[in-house]
Image: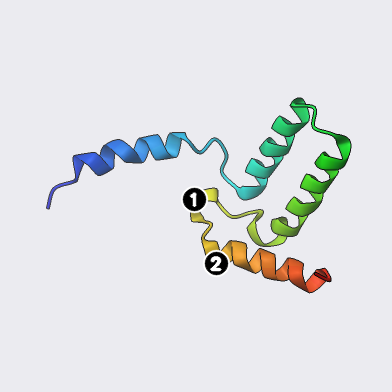
Amino acid sequence: MGKDPAVERRQPVAEERLPVDTFKDGALEYIERRRRENLAVPTMIKKKWLLEFAYPTLGRMKVIDIKPVHVLRVLQDIGHYQDF
């Protein structure tokens, strides 16, 4: 069987859109962008605080490998620490 040219064309584009490798790299880049936008200090503190919950589960994972079940695990873990 031959290769699908449409899939081959899309693959490099998808890879080019990923400027970071891991979730934590992306999160740190996100925080830096928001800092340059001069978000309020309390907003930045809250963003960093929330991301800290994700690092143990997602931090070292490649962004492309993260699935909804991984995000669900983070949310469930937050629920164990918080009284909602």
Judged from this view, the residue extending furthest toward the right is 42
Sequence-first tag of 1 and 2: 1
Image-based side of 76 in relation to 15, left or right: right
Label 2: how many residues lie within 10 Å, few (<14), some (14-19) or many (20+)? few
Q: Residue at x 80, y 32 (%)?
A: 39
Q: Quarter holding the C terminus?
A: bottom right
Label 2 belongs to which residue?
A: 69
Cα separation between marks 1 and 2? 14 Å
* Relative image position of residue 34 (x, y in whole percent): 73, 33
Relative to the observer, which residue lies in front, 83 or 36?
A: 83
Which amino acid lies under the numbered mark 1 shown in the image of this protein? Ile
Label 1 belongs to which residue?
A: 64
Q: Residue at x 45, y 34 (%)?
A: 16
Label 1: how many residues lie within 10 Å, few (<14), some (14-19) or many (20+)? few
Which amino acid lies under the numbered mark 2 shown in the image of this protein? Val
Label ID, residue 53: none
**Secondary structure state at the residue bearing disc 2:** helix
Asked whether the residues under the numbered discs 1 and 2 touch, taking CB atoms below 8 Å apart as contact, a structural biologist would say: no
Relative to the observer, which residue lies in front, 62 or 43?
A: 43
* Relative image position of residue 48 (x, y in whole percent): 79, 46
Q: Residue at x 72, y 69 (%)?
A: 77
Residue 82 found in image quarter: bottom right
